[in-house]
Image (cartoon, grey):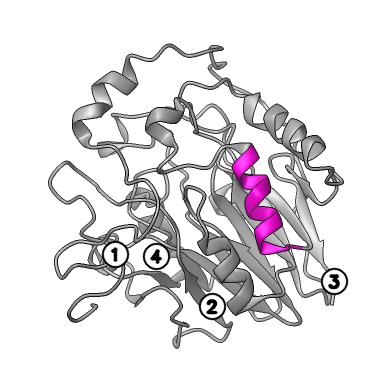
Amino acid sequence: MIRGTSDHFDGRRFHNPTGPQPQPFSKVPRMLLERRSTPWPRYVEDPPQTLPGVDGTSAVVTFIGHATFLIQTSSGNILTDPIYSDVAGPLNTFGPRRVRRPAVALDDLPPIAIVLLSHNHYDHCDLPTLRQIATRFDPVVITPIGNGRLARSAGIRRVEELDWWQQASSTGIPITATPAHHFSARHPFDRNRALWSGFLVKTGTKQIYFAGDTAYGAFFRDIRHRLAPIDLALLPIGAYEPRWFMQSVHMNPAEAVQAHIDLESSQSVGMHFGTFPMTIEGIDEPVRALEVALRANRIDPSRFRTLRFGESVRLDT
């Protein structure tokens, strides 16, 4: 735990040092009354994809859904913010219901050595999933400060908590926690008692940045200055409307494109869309808005794209 205070910790709670602060819980009812622009389908069936092997490459990154990626490396396999439950919410009962099944079944996962847990929101920290992963794989969980107790409650034995810019010491793969602009809470009374972050993973000669859950901020340039080059950035593009409520916690696609520019990432992949109907934009709107933002910034769409659910991107040495 941080001792004393820092630019993002006042001795009791964490906060975003710059930019707009998240709306209070008292504003949630107003947000929930906003009308959805386009109804989501109840279920989407995606064509099956084949999970490739590493085969001497630095990494193979597969989109499982929402913010869950499988990162296969020769040094061990990594899972980001794993959620396999049907509902993202308390007791797996209250909250948005999944419209796409995980693109790689939990039983089909290769051995998982490391789980990256960006923060404690239900759609990123799913305790039933963590329990299954703990039983099957006994991984190390790398997470920001204050989330260790929650991970251990799911049966995770090995947890390392990091502050921003700290590097993990318990993994054979270099992993650095990076700043994010967000908040934490499991219920109305624990707001910002735990930290939130992204992660920079170095595998072989390549570096992968997983942004976690975040609004846009100047810290993307800081990440580039400190940790570049970034070969692949995994950036959230969904759950961004209405802007009066979401701007302080989630990027929209145009802001994600600006983050891609700030990071000077060789390539970026969108995430945090098309899985749970969390906010009022339609299921396909993030992808369409990303295409518009790329054209507006004259960026080749091959530099920032979305993967099909279950599709992989390979980073060669």
For mark 2, give the secondary structure: strand
Q: Amino acid at mark 3?
A: Asp
User: Which of 279/3 is in front?
Assistant: 3
Please name the residue that numbered disc 1 is placed on.
147
**In the rendering, at what x and y percent does residue 275 appear?**
55, 33
Q: Amino acid at mark 2?
A: Ile
Quick one: label 1 or label 3, which is nearer the N terminus? 1
Q: Looking at the image, do the residues carrying marks 4 and 3 touch, with CB atoms under 8 Å apart?
A: no
**In the rendering, at what x and y percent does residue 161 appear?**
34, 75
Instruction: Give the spatial CA distance, label 3 vs label 2.
Output: 19 Å
**In the rendering, at what x and y percent does residue 254 appear?**
64, 39
Instruction: Give the spatial CA distance, label 1 vs label 3.
Output: 33 Å
Quick one: label 2 or label 1, which is nearer the N terminus? 1
Magenta stretch: give its range. Answer: 254-265
Is residue 264 covered in magenta? yes
In the drawing, does residue 76 fall left or right of residue 61? Answer: left
Residue 278 seen in the current view: no
Mark in the foreground, 4 or 1: 1
Please name the residue that numbered disc 3 is placed on.
316
Instruction: Give the spatial CA distance, label 4 vs label 2.
Output: 20 Å
**In the rendering, at what x and y percent does residue 4 appear?**
17, 79
Residue at the image point whose x is 53% and y is 42% from the top: 251
For mark 4, give the secondary structure: helix
Q: Amino acid at mark 4?
A: Ala
Tag shown at residue 175: 2
Q: Would you call the spot at circle 1 few (<14 residues within 10 Å), some (14-19), or many (20 or more)? A: many
Quarter occupied by residue 266:
bottom right
Residue 190 seen in the current view: yes
